[in-house]
Image (tube, rainbow, N blue to C red):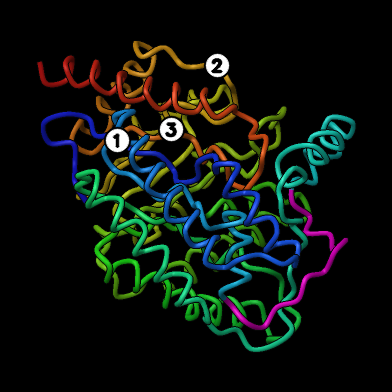
Amino acid sequence: MRTSETRILTTHVGSLPRPHDLLDVLKLKMDGAAYDPAELDTRIAASVDQMVAQQVAAGIDIVADGEMSKPGHAIYIEERLTGYEQRPGFDTGYYRAEKEAFPEYYEDYFARAHLGGAIAPAHPVICVGPVAYVGLDDLKRDLANLKAACDKHGVAEAFMPCAAVTGVGHNEYYGSQEEYMYAVADALSVEYRAIIKAGFLLQVDDPFLPHVYMDTSLSEKERLAKANLYVETVNHSIRGIPVEKIRYHTCYGINQGPRVYEPDLPMMVNEVLKVNAGAYSFEAGNPRHEHEYHLWEEVKLPEGKLVLPGVITHASSVVEHPEYVAERIIRFAERCGRENVIASTDCGFSSQAIYKTEVENRVVWAKLAALAEGARIASDRLWG
């Protein structure tokens, strides 16, 4: 994993708006309708090439495939693991405090946007049998597409985001939650290791650890025990992979909303830093969390680790001014060391495959260009 040795490098969290011609075929597949697999593969490859080209043009250094082949950042894993069934109407308990505090807002929001607007219904999945990884063919296609695009457009470094063990379904098969999560971790490690072998960085997407701190049904002791189990199983899933090849991403799951009942990063930073990753990605660009950079005045970033703070947000369509982006970057550089900061986004801009993204397509690219320009301004001030 490169560091910001001579300038602030730029990246993002992974998901980008899918082209509509890709969504048309992907939706047929997800609906169980007739579609041409060869046409889908062709459109996925073309879309990955387009996304990498646009990231390079916007000034992004460390790119991704935009999750072009995936119906959702966690939903896709259902296609790659056995042992699950969908359970429409199952109450996951996610965002309970938010939904109870703002029922009218979230009833509308979840119906028209976020998961409600996706091409594939995000029904909860329940583990009803042994978990095993069966997604190598799809994974090999994704890796080949990203490699071809990176080679074509002269990209030096790329990453592939993957679901964390913490976000894969609910258990009704294994004897305990711990046994279940370790089984999922073993299955996911197949995907993780293949990504590293292909020469890419691995990003473990974990918006589910923060949910532990949002769960008002848990006592403080129960919350800590659950968070520690999450960290232990994430570490089990990435065991043996060099830490400098791993990015660990946390976010809060909701894109646009009041977001009053999210935990602050200081509440969970001890658990986050226990994850054996080389870089930590977190929200820092939206008004609920922007002040949290002060955390790094008291918490020392471990030696050899990097931070990937969000300096632009997916929670608003306002295009951040590059000067302000630079200020945000410099805050972290002053506290964590300029070489340890890579400028990133709060979260993905299309965590679900959706025709109408919450931040419009052209606005996404304007935001990423502002990120790159802000990093250039910050670099001039930090290196002179």
Q: The disc labelled 2 sits on which kind of residue?
A: Val
| Quadrant in the rendering for residue 128 | bottom right
Residue assigned mark 1: 56
Q: Out of 209 and 79, give the one closest to the viewer.
A: 79
Name the N-terminal-most of marks 2 and 1: 1
Magenta stretch in the rendered image: 81-94
Residue 187 spot, x, y in % from top left:
50, 79
| Mark seen at residue 318 | 2
Q: The disc labelled 1 sits on which kind of residue?
A: Val
Camera-side mark, 1 or 3 = 1
Q: Residues within 10 Å of mark 1 (few under 14, many from 20)?
A: some
Q: Is residue 210 left or right of residue 117?
A: left
Q: The disc labelled 3 sits on which kind of residue?
A: Gly
Q: Is residue 83 magenta?
A: yes
- Residue 303 visible in the shown view: no
Per the model, the C-alpha gap separating discs 2 and 3 is 15 Å
Residue 215 spot, x, y in % from top left:
72, 51
Residue drawn at 85 percent across, 64 percent down: 88
Q: Out of 140 and 349, give the one closest to the viewer.
A: 140
Residue assigned mark 3: 310
Q: Are marks 2 and 3 in contact (CB under 8 Å)?
A: no
Residue 32 spot, x, y in % from top left:
75, 67
Residue 312 spot, x, y in % from top left:
45, 26
